[in-house]
Image (cartoon, rainbow, N blue to C red):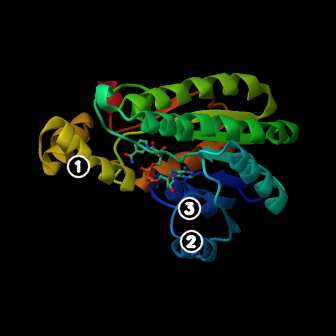
């Protein structure tokens, strides 16, 4: 389905990004992985994905806090693979705290990684997509792009922002064969969610089990975590020709959370 295409997936050394990268590689796209982490583990992940699929898989360690490294990620992918046809802006971080105690540095980092980095990546990738007349940009939003939860001021702001950025860029590139969408997962059990459970327990004065049952899954009518594989398959569908008319959309995959 995606043979001959190349995908950049930011934040793909773990969790949802790795699942999206896997789905795109299984669909035939070459993939440029990106993210932070131990170099040996990342190389093992890269080599495994390459051996399990027919895709060529590279890795670029751009830090999403650094605009020049984000630009280099896009340009290096174009140089190494010939094009960057699919851009998945997925890297993200979270911090849970009441607004009056919210650390300013955490606010700045969350806005930079979750919202500003996708702007820089799109800025760098869009010209060649327009020139080639084909492109797919997928931003990993969140149910928090559509609704809020307490104690997540920066994250909810960044995710609502990415929904607006998605719609704006989608309008700009619509006539050039390029689609731009935001996918909005509900709770997926990844390191990002696991790590916020203790802070949520502290902020709400409840146990960690109560956080899972009464806070996380309470929001999801299915009472099931969304799986990384479901998000990966959804992203691959948005890259298909069948999805060519889906653009500027903010699309929940959240077990019914945001329909309430
Ligand atoms: P994760 O912590 O498993 O993965 C985050 C990825 O981002 C990792 O690869 C990490 O290395 C990378 N990353 C973090 N900071 C970076 C930086 N400065 N530069 C480059 N890479 C960086 O988290 P996840 O749950 O897989 O989250 C992925 C995306 O999905 C995020 O945008 C998150 O907001 C979103 N999301 C997650 C959930 C969930 O329930 N897990 C729900 C909705 C949306």
Q: Are there few (<14), some (14-19), or many (20+) residues within 10 Å of tag 1?
A: some
Label 3 to label 2: alpha-carbon separation: 19 Å
250 horizontally vs 83: left or right: left
The quadrant where residue 217 appears: top left
Indicate the secondary structure of the residue bearing disc 3.
Answer: helix
Please name the residue shown 20% across and 47% down the image: 212
Labels 3 and 2: the sequence-earlier one: 3
Indicate the secondary structure of the residue bearing disc 2.
Answer: helix
Where is residue 110? Give x, y as percent: 48, 38
Whether pointer 1 and pointer 2 mark residues with C-beta atoms closer than 8 Å, the reply is no
The quadrant where residue 12 appears: bottom right
Please name the residue shown 45% across and 56% down the image: 15
Identity of the residue furthest to the right in this view: 131
Q: Is residue 29 visible?
A: no
> Residue 67 has which mark?
none
- The label nearer to you, 1 versus 3, is 1
Label 1 to label 3: alpha-carbon separation: 30 Å
Query: Mark 3 = which residue?
Result: 22
Query: Mark 1 = which residue?
Result: 198
Whether pointer 3 and pointer 2 mark residues with C-beta atoms closer than 8 Å, the reply is no
Whether pointer 1 and pointer 3 mark residues with C-beta atoms closer than 8 Å, the reply is no
Indicate the secondary structure of the residue bearing disc 1.
Answer: helix
Query: Mark 2 = which residue?
Result: 39
* Label 2 CB-ligand 1 distance < 8 A: no
Where is residue 228? Give x, y as percent: 43, 54
């Amino acid at each position: 389905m995606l043979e001959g295409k190349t995908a950049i997936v930011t934040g793909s050394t773990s969790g949802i990004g790795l699942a999206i990268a896997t789905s795109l590689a299984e669909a035939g796209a070459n993939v440029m992985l990106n993210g932070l982490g131990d170099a040996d583990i990342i190389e093992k992940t890269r080599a495994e994905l390459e051996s399990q699929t027919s895709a060529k898989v590279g890795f670029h360690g751009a830090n999403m806090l650094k605009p020049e490294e984000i630009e280099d990620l896009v340009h290096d992918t174009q140089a190494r693979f010939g094009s960057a046809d699919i851009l998945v802006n997925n890297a993200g971080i979270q911090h849970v705290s009441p607004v009056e105690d919210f650390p300013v540095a955490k606010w700045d980092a969350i806005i930079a990684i979750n919202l500003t980095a996708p702007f820089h990546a799109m800025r760098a990738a869009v010209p060649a997509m327009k020139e080639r007349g084909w492109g797919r940009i997928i931003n990993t939003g969140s149910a928090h792009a559509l609704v809020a939860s307490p104690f997540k001021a920066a994250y909810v702001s960044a995710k609502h922002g990415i929904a607006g950025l998605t719609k704006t860029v989608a309008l700009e590139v619509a006539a050039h064969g390029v689609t731009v969408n935001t996918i909005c997962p509900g709770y997926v059990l990844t390191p990002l969610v696991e790590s916020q459970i203790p802070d949520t327990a502290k902020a709400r004065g409840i146990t960690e089990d109560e956080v899972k049952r009464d806070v996380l899954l309470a929001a999801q009518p299915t009472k099931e975590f969304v799986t990384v594989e479901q998000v990966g398959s959804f992203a691959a569908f948005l890259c298909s020709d069948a999805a060519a008319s889906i653009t500027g959309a903010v699309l929940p995959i959240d077990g019914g959370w945001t329909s309430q």
